[in-house]
Amino acid sequence: MNPPTSLSPRLLLWAAALLLLASASARAFDIGGDIDFYPFPTYHNTRNEGNTYGGVLVFLVVNKKHEIEHVIAPLIQYNDFSGFEGGLLAFGYPSDHQEYKAVISWSQDVNREIRLGYSDRKWQGGKYDIGVKAEYGQSGTERFFGLGPDSAREDESSFGQEEYRDEAHFGLNLSDHLTVGIGERFRDERIFQGLVGTVPFVGTQFPGEPGVDGATVLGSRIYLTFNTRDSSQTPTEGYYVGVSAEGVAGLAGDTPSSYEKYEVEGKKFIPFGNDHQFVLVLRAKVELGSGPQAPFWDEASLGGDKSLRAFGSDRWIDRHSWLINVEQRIRIWSFSMFDYPLELEAAPFIDVGTVFHDAGGIGENVQVNPGVAVRLLSRPNIVGGMSISWGQDGLLVVGGFSFPF
């Protein structure tokens, strides 16, 4: 399928409407502070999606302490595969324990996204931990290389993916740091021929792979967390430990009747130097599966900006995975821009991990990926930056609006 080459008049109207909506939303979020807006160019390149470039108008809502609490950002971009795209991103932190996010985007061809989420770690005066998410997405540039740590780049396949996701959790805060809770997630996946005609379709490359014809699953989990971090968004000290167990029922489509998933994650933040100029971050994560083989898109996976950063999302997939990240965050400059206090941070890192089918493969084809990240921070809530990492598939540059962990 060839990339679109013309700009739809409806998309121009959509972009204009987004600008008006963002302006109105910014005013609606006024909490007694200031509202400022700034235009920025945008560009990113990934192996899956190709080039994307355009512009964004960022509205910042600042509280009386001159901290950025809300960000509303309409944007318009052009992608090599999906053409022109209009979108709106809004996220904010009304307090140190509340967070919301809303993302809406619509492209000329296939790609579209609606994501809504809200969480409050100290709901009802600190008694409860709650969170809800509702997401719809459609992408035409997904990839699958096969299962296992030895999946080869030469076996790459592509597909389009339409998915609905709903998640909710409810936890009881047993203390300031300890929480126990339950959660539910619904996931419905539909697989179709995507936008990348130069790469074989997943149904042709991997016929019979569980999940390749789509499926619907429902997961129920229990979780336990212990969290002493000094900030949920920009931590500099403390640690986090999370443990969860989930039973998943196959409701429809190409999926077993049931399977299980288990996860353990630990993070440690070690500050040193004047005013926490240096923060060493250690993270370890293990995902385990049990029972019949799950759909490939619901198995343990590595790759993306929050795991093995040298690879695209879900580059490595199998029943189980383990991951270790070590990152040295260094504040190299504190300054003010647009009257906001900012910090420029450099962070050399190394990501190590692999996927495996059974205990005998736990050390097979372990990926070791060095890299460096450069970020701009507006504490206590806002992080933006990019990372460059090296792996067996080459060099990858990715950006984001949060710490990877």
Image (cartoon, rainbow, N blue to C red):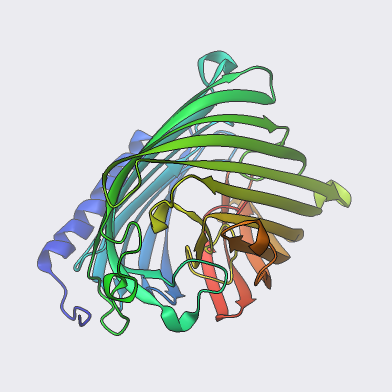
Provide residue 71's location: percent of width, then percent of height.
44, 46
136 w.r.t. 120: above or below: below
Residue 245 visible here:
yes
Provide residue 350's location: percent of width, then percent of height.
72, 66
Residue at 33% over, 76% down = 205
Residue positioned most to the right: 273
Closer to the camera in the image, 59 or 141: 141
Provide residue 319's location: percent of width, then percent of height.
52, 55
301 w.r.t. 186: above or below: below
Residue 165 visible here:
no
Residue at 65% over, 17% down = 174
Residue at 28% over, 50% down = 215
Closer to the camera in the image, 173 or 75: 173
200 w.r.t. 133: above or below: below
Provide residue 21's location: percent of width, then percent of height.
26, 46
Closer to the camera in the image, 354 or 133: 354
Q: Quadrant of the N terminus?
A: bottom left
Residue at 87% over, 50% down = 274
The reply, left or right, for residue 246 in relation to residue 378 is left
- Badge count: 0
The reply, left or right, for residue 13 in relation to residue 115 is left
Which image quarter: residue 79?
bottom left
Closer to the camera in the image, 180 or 288: 288
